Amino acid sequence: MGTCILDNIQSPADLKGLSLEEARQLAAEIRAHILGVVSGKGGHLGASLGAVELTIALHRVFDAPKDRLVWDTGHQAYPHKLLTGRLKAFSTLRQHGGISGFLSRGESPYDTFGAGHAGTAISAALGIVEARDHQQGKYHVIAIVGDGSLTAGMAYEALNHAGGLKRNLIVVLNDNEMSISKNVGAVSAYLNRMITGPLYTKVKNETESMIRHIPRIGTPVLNATKRAEGAMKGFLTAGAFFEEMGFRYIGPIDGHRLDHLLSTFENVKNLNGPLLVHVISRKGKGYAPAEANPGAFHGVSAFELSTGIAKKKSANPTYTAIFANCLISLATQNDRVVGITAAMPEGTGLHQFAKAFPSRFYDVGIAEQHAVTMAAGMAADGLRPVVAIYSTFLQRAYDQMIHDVALQNLPVVFCLDRAGLVGEDGPTHHGVFDIAYCKAIPNFIVMAPKDENELCRMLATALTCHHPVAIRYPRGEGIGVSLDDPPTALPIGKGEIVIEPSGAWDVVLFAIGSMVYPAQRVAIQLEREGISAAVVNARFIKPLDRALLNAVASRCNKIVTLEEHVLCGGFGESVIAALQEEGLQGVEVRRIGLPDHFIEHGAPAILREMHGLTAERISTAVLEFCREVLVLHR
Ligand SMILES: Cc1ncc(C[n+]2csc(CCOP(=O)(O)OP(=O)(O)O)c2C)c(N)n1
């Protein structure tokens, strides 16, 4: 990649001396560099391409890391990484041992506040503002938040608080009218009216004339500021909503006009109180396939740069796709079934459901808490809501799960996609806490399928239950098994023995969800070593199949539990507790699962290998556990 200006940017300080023309060239180089790396390795593309000029302008006008840039979500931060000393490391993006795809305080002093989940930036920035003011610090704090992230309830909680406190805080609203899919809701429509209506033209003309009159870009001139203030009066009507929230509204500004951005930020720097700068940008800017299809290019796997076509085709349908098809067929038979997503229609597969049942589909925005309580309300009045949310994002809605759903024992079905290790997105996105957080809640039924057929059976089961139900299933392709048509319901709380060796058993592999197939491979490997291993597919974490546990424990006093989840609060702990409560003494248990620390980013295969979840690593661990048996056999 023949970069030229970018190669010489060691830190944001190097931006200060660039001419406007050079800064524009830099923008083109950053785009080319991001495209080169992301087309080869995958990553978040559209948001970063759309934020190039904005990032250059912020880093040129403000003085990070002294001034604090707090990026919401972090998926748009690739230009920020490239300008803050991570150009060389950028080729390692999202790979194990390489730099993170999001923001990470451990990675760089320029990453003021870590992120990965949306909607946190304004709250975090306000906290930093308070810390600054308590300690008489002198620096700017700038939260950069997308219009999608502005659908998150926490963003409003923070705006409300910040507007009341009246401290110096800059919020940059980077508005590309897109969440991952098209943004939703009344505020999104309001923002859209601001940028498409006649008012925008008026405001834009005023901005342009204001900028023309600024003597030299980069010089804070009082007169220019005054003129800016004057011009801003015209914006009052445009940003009335934010003004009412206690913010001074500035904008809308073209997010790809470096000159506009630079002069606006120079002016904003000299203003006091809470400010909101409304920047209009285009997701995927500069790469035609991404501009044409921003939803698909939000996050991508490796693709052909010339065409935008993905390099790898999946062999089997994904769990997500199977879930969506199955839900559609179940909803065809039951018109009370509705589907709810929190800004992830494609990610959860519910976009297919939306096509089939437009009036029974709800995209609530990045509002997991609201999604859950709305589902509770729907269930309270006779609907059968299916809430499809990634395991990691459902963490947001814990009180709603307890207080609004479970306490009233409402039949809401939670479909937790991306449960387990998700790979390159890393610690903000691994879905490894859901067993712990679901099983602790009374009235919940918690299940995990061994394959995609069982996922369908679990969904069919869940829709017959009069309780809240959580089904956790992994990211990516299914096993490739055929599907029962129609899927039959499972008996609640009943597991199955999937490998039942004749004769005495040396060990029982008690597995849940994605660990059942690996456990079967382990049993086959162990057989070669002379170890007789039974394999149980638990199916239910709660209620756990105690009869089955009793039965296997009476045949064998060694149990290995297997889960793709943290051990702390996990499935294995449930097995141990059940053995104890059933009075099954003398059974030795070894738990295999994830450790009590955050799991880094990297290819799923590498992470599984590192954390002992491959069939090979499990075999070794089980052999070790069974070593007395081995001694006896030999
Ligand atoms: C709590 C939470 N829910 C869902 C997501 C998934 N997600 C990642 S980015 C995104 C859209 C963000 O839109 P916006 O803030 O407008 O940024 P853009 O990508 O458009 O720049 C969503 C829904 C998330 N990161 N966090």
Image (tube, grey):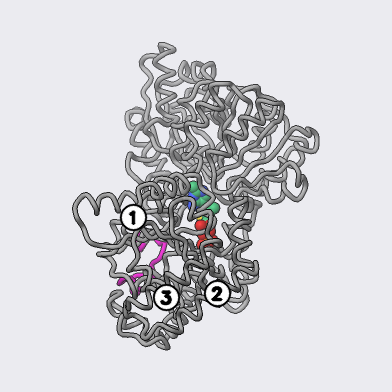
The numbered mark, 3 or 1, whose residue comes first in the sequence reads: 1
Figure disc tally: 3
- The amino acid type found where label 1 is placed reads Phe
Marks 3 and 1, how far apart at CA = 34 Å
Instruction: Determine the residue positioned at 30% across, 84% down.
Output: 17
Q: Name the residue carrying label 3.
A: 227
- Upstream in sequence: badge 2 or badge 3: 2
Q: Which mark is residue 32?
A: none
Q: CA distance from mark 1 to mark 2?
A: 33 Å
User: Could you tell me if residue 533 is visible in this image?
Assistant: no
Q: Is residue 92 magenta?
A: yes
Q: Image quarter for residue 626?
A: top left
The kind of residue on which mark 2 rests is: Lys
Location of the C terminus by quadrant is: top left
Which residue, as the protein is rendered here, is positioned at the far right? 333
Give the camera-side residue of 471 and 150. Answer: 150
Q: Amino acid at mark 3?
A: Arg
Label 3 residue SS: helix
Depth check: 149 or 40 in front? Answer: 149
Residue that numbered label 1 is attached to: 113
184 or 338, which is in the foreground?
184
Mark nearer the viewer, 3 or 1? 3
**Relative horizontal placement of residue 546, taking residue 600 as reference (left or right):** right
Magenta segment range? 83-99
Give the residue at x 69% y 45%.
324
Indicate which disc residue 204 carries.
2
Give above or below for 601 relative to 38. above
